[in-house]
Amino acid sequence: MLKGKSLLEPMDFTTEELEELFLLSDEIIEAPERYAKVCEGKLLATLFYEPSTRTRFSFEAAMLRLGGQVIGFSEPNSSSVSKGESISDTIRTVACYADMAVMRHPKEGAPKVAAACTDMPVVNAGDGGHQHPTQTLTDLLTIRREKGGFENITVGLCGDLKFGRTVHSLIKALSRYRNVSFIMISPDELKIPDYVRKEVLIKNNIPFEETGNMQEALPKLDVLYMTRVQRERFFNEEDYVRLKDRYILDGSKMKLAKDDMMVLHPLPRVNEIAIEVDSDPRALYFKQAQYGMYVRMALIMGLLGIKG
C-alpha cells in the first residue's frame, strides 16, 4: 500500500495506512529476529543538513537491523553541498546509488523539493520549524501501545509550541481521531502558530485550551508532551535565556497528575524534565525513543514494498 510513496508530512498517510504501519511495528517488536534480513541488498541514504542524534541513529539502526546498509552525511560540510550543489542535484545523484533517502534540512519544504526530483521514496526527518512526520509516527505508536488507541484522550503540549515542529505534526495527526482534546501550555511568546490554531483545531472543531499554568493543566491530562525551548530557533539569546526554564516538570508536579498519565518528550531534553522524573513509571520518553526505531523499521519496509 505504501510502496514508492514519500513521507513529507503527517497527513500523507491515511489512518488506514498508519494502522497498517503500526500493526507491522507490533509484529517487529514481538519478533525482531524474523525481520533481520528482509532488507538485504537495500541501501538507505541519510542526508542530514542539520545536526541530529536520535533521528539519524534511529533510521540507521532501523535499516541495519533489517539487514540493509546505510550511506550518507551527517552535516553538509562533509558533502558537495559545501561546494554549492543544489538539493535537486544532490537527490538525483543519490538516487543513482540508494533505494530511499531520509532528509533533515533547516529550510521548510526542502524535502518536498527533493521528493519532486526523484521516484525514490524520500522521508522528511525534519524541515525547519515545519514538520517532523517520523517523530509523529513514533509518538502515535507510543500512545497507541501504551493507551490502547487514540480516542477519548486529553493531550497536554508544553513548552515551545511556536517553533516545535514535533508539536505541529502531532496535533495534525491526532486531529483525525475521535474525542481528542488538547491543552496548550506555553508562555505567550511561544504559543502555537495561527495556522495550526485556525487550520487544524478551529477548522475541525477540536476542543482545545491555552494556558500559561502547568500545575492547573496537569490533573486533566492523559498524555503530557514536553518540549525543550530550542536555542537554534531564536534570533536573540536574551529571549532564549528568559524563556528556556519557564516550565520544569519535577517530582512535586508529577503528584498532581493522574496515576496513568504518560510523559512523552521528542528529546533531546535540557532542563524541562528533572532527572528525578526518569524513575517514575509514567515517564516513557526513552521507551518512546525505542518505539521510534521500530516504527521506522516498519516505514522502511512499507516504502520499499518489502513484506515480512
Image (spheres, grey):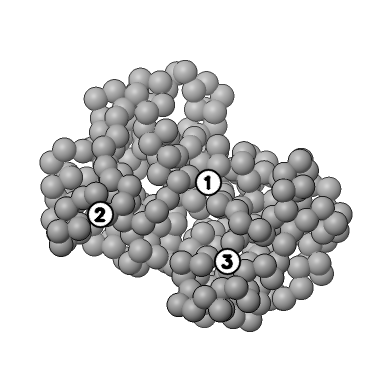
Q: Report x, y in % for residue 98.
A: 21, 38
SS for dot 2: helix
Amino acid marked by disc 2? Asn
Q: Which residue position holds label 1?
A: 138
Q: Estimate how packed mark 1 is, as few (under 14), some (14 to 19) or many (20 or more) residues with alpha carbons within 10 Å.
A: many
**Going from the N terminus, do you reach mark 3 or mark 1 first?**
1
Q: Which residue position holds label 3?
A: 229
Q: Estimate how packed mark 2 is, as few (under 14), some (14 to 19) or many (20 or more) residues with alpha carbons within 10 Å.
A: few
Residue located 55% across and 42% down the image: 289
Q: Report x, y in % for residue 275.
A: 72, 48
SS for dot 1: helix
Quarter occupied by residue 112: bottom left
Amino acid marked by disc 1? Thr
Residue located 50% across and 52% down the image: 136
For this view, does 270 lie left or right of residue 219? left
Q: Where 46 sits versus 154, above or below?
A: above
Amino acid marked by disc 3? Val
Q: Nearer the viewer, mark 1 or mark 2?
A: 2
Q: Which residue position holds label 2?
A: 77
Q: Nearer the viewer, mark 3 or mark 1?
A: 3
**Going from the N terminus, do you reach mark 2 or mark 3 first?**
2
SS for dot 3: loop
Quarter occupied by residue 214: bottom right
